[in-house]
Amino acid sequence: MLFLTLLCFTLPLCFAFRPPAVPLVMGDPYFNVWSMADKLTDADTKMWNTQNKTMVGLIRIDGSCYRWMGSAWNAPSNCQTAMPQTTVNVNFSTTEYVFSQSGVTLSVMFTSYFNALDLVSLSLPVTYVSFEVQVGSADVQIYFDAAADFATYKSTEPMVWNRATYGPLSTMRVGTQTQPVLQQSGDWVAIDWGYFYVSTLPDVTTSTVMQAGTVSRAQFASQGTLPSSDDTRMPRPVTDHMPVLAVAWDLTQADPKETSYRRTVILAYDDVASINWFGTFLPPYWRMVFNNSTVAMLQHAAAQIDSVLLAADQLDGQLSADTSARAGAEYTTLTALAYRQVFAACKLVWNPVNQAVWYFMKEISSDGDLSTVDVVFPASPIFLWLNPQLLAMQMLPMYPYASNEVPSGYNKTWAPHHLGIYPIGGPINQEDMPVEETSNLILMAAAIVQRNGNDVSFFYPHYMPLFRQWADYLVANLPDTGDQLCTDDFEGPSPHNANLAAKGIVALAAYSYLCTVVGATTEAEQISAIVQNFTAAWISMAQTTANGTQPLHYKLEYDIVNSWSLKYNIMYQRILNFAVFDDTVLQQESDFYLANMLTFGIPLDSRGALTKLDWQFWIAAMTKDPSLEQKIISVLYNWASSTPTRVPLTDYYLTTTGAQLGFQARPVVGGLFSLMLIDD
């Protein structure tokens, strides 16, 4: 068996960990499907927004039918019994479910291979669903289908489907009749253009059909076969006898000497075009690689099945070893759960105008914005660790937008908040966070330069005046930021915010570093002197005294004496190996956080019990306190395993009950990888 089973989430002998949701089909913000239950048969599979993206799995063992995926609602009346699930293992690339019944063992693996150093793997809109079956002496048939609701979010949308043979590859596809490419945008929506594909490599055991789900499932349950012909009544909406793309394998037709079988289905989504950038349609990067041919992309995916599954297994082994060595098995469990969530919120595209690869991120579930700067920023650690160039590719659209080189209408002296509403870039009302976003862009640029061997070509020399303008803005608005929004805007305004000011001060140190790299040494020295003055002023204004059992710490707002907050923004100085704030400040904050930790984490600040998952990992990386680091990991591991809210990882919840307050499936969980950047 190829796949490592390092993360045994339900097997008592391994980690007693229950994921809040399990990643299944992961490609981009639209091709993004989860199981939000303990067992794959407890509920229907869903997109991150909880809309059904229906997959059903059945198995016949010696004539008796069992369900291994999907709710009883979608199963035939004679196939209501669930096949017992023994484990679910979530690794970085692969989720594996294992079922056992009547001496037959079925392993089902969902593999989405995101290799940060391989742009083709990041762009390929493919998830492999692999089946390994130990049949013993039983007669076994297996059934899998995926429904037309993968290709639309509107129940009334007329759907069409067809099939084709690409060399040895047998392919079925479904999509909307109208194909409104890049005509809609927003947050809690799914795609309604492009085509969803189910492909197989045929053999004597394999059959496929496009039929109403009730028809194909019922015939398989009773006879172990599929209908002999496709349903041709189209177009019709998904609510009209839901069309499905079904595959079945009759393993009794295979070599009778075999007792173990492996089969793989390729699930793919061709979105035609990915981003509308001020009227220019940017295709997914794979279209440039495969000469704009979906056929070539699918043939490549089929030809690479074995090598990709092996590479995914090797990547999982390496990432597991690295994260475990850094912070232990619980940390590996959490980062494995977050990994595909991050990459599936992003889209790698080809810009034909400037012949460049750009990388966009969707602010999933909290606004639907395109490349929100203060969402890219908390996610940045995963990219800086694995491939800093990916973060540079996310910066490339931000600079022309901020400079109004595209018709953005942006003319402010500080950095923009976002570039449009996903997937459409364009002029938009900005949620201004001047110090927040300006600092974020300077800090990320400095980290990219530092980790790319001082390569500044992604912004220099053309955009150096923009950086100088941003630095001037920070100098004029520090060390007291006044009344500004920060990224934690869900808590409302926080004037004179000490954490926001700390970010701006570290960002000025980062700008000084960039000046040094590009040879502007006099400017670097001037900014460095300003940073020292601002840091001293920050300590004087932000520090409070020890009070009873509360250690000395630093305020939420300069003018509120009995206040405090997580100073997660200081963490970036550790990424950059700066010492803007000395170890005394870090230790004082660390002691205070330990004293104020609640059941499921450290509150964000003194205003209540809410917190952010990503910022707590930044705190673990910031403080240089191993005891706090391990305490945070253990508490957050317990929270993820017991939160009552069953959605893809939320980053916004209550530290008292563990319940989600909002947000889910957001890429900010890339911040969990911040520990991998420290002392690496």
Image: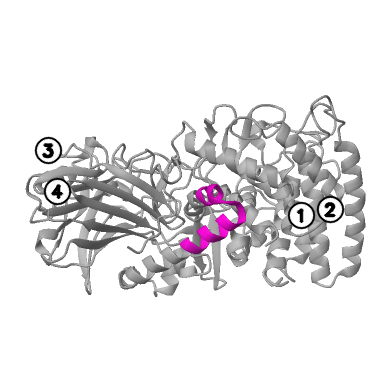
**Direction from residue 679 to residue 201 in the image, left or right:** left
Instruction: Decide whether residue 658 is among the magenta residues.
Output: no
**Direction from residue 191 to residue 610 in the image, left or right:** right
**Can the viewer see residue 281 in this picture?**
no
Give the number of the disc on residue 78: 3
Q: Position of residue 336 (x, y in %)?
A: 49, 52
Q: Which residue is mark 2?
A: 580
Answer few, some or many: residues within 10 Å of disc 4's Cα (few below 14, many 20 plus, some between 14 and 19): many
Q: Position of residue 161 (x, y in %)?
A: 22, 56
Quarter of the picture containing the N terminus is: bottom left
Tag 4–tag 1 contact (CB < 8 Å)? no
Judging depth in this view, the residue of 23 and 473 nearest the camera is 23
Q: Quadrant of residue 463?
A: bottom right
Judging depth in this view, the residue of 343 and 3 nearest the camera is 3
Q: Position of residue 416 (x, y in %)?
A: 68, 51
Q: If you read the primary sequence from the N terminus, does the residue marked by circle 2 or circle 3 appear first?
A: 3
Judging depth in this view, the residue of 414 and 256 nearest the camera is 256
Tag 2–tag 3 contact (CB < 8 Å)? no
Please tell me whether mark 3 sits on a helix, a strand or a loop: loop
Looking at this rendering, what residue extends furthest in the top direction?
548
Tell me the magenta residue range: 317-335
Q: Amino acid at mark 4?
A: Arg
Q: Position of residue 675 (x, y in %)?
A: 64, 53
Tag 1–tag 2 contact (CB < 8 Å)? yes
Secondary structure that dominates the magenta span:
helix
Is 501 above or below relative to 291?
A: above
Quarter of the picture containing the C terminus is: bottom right
Q: Residue at x 58, y 41 (%)?
A: 634
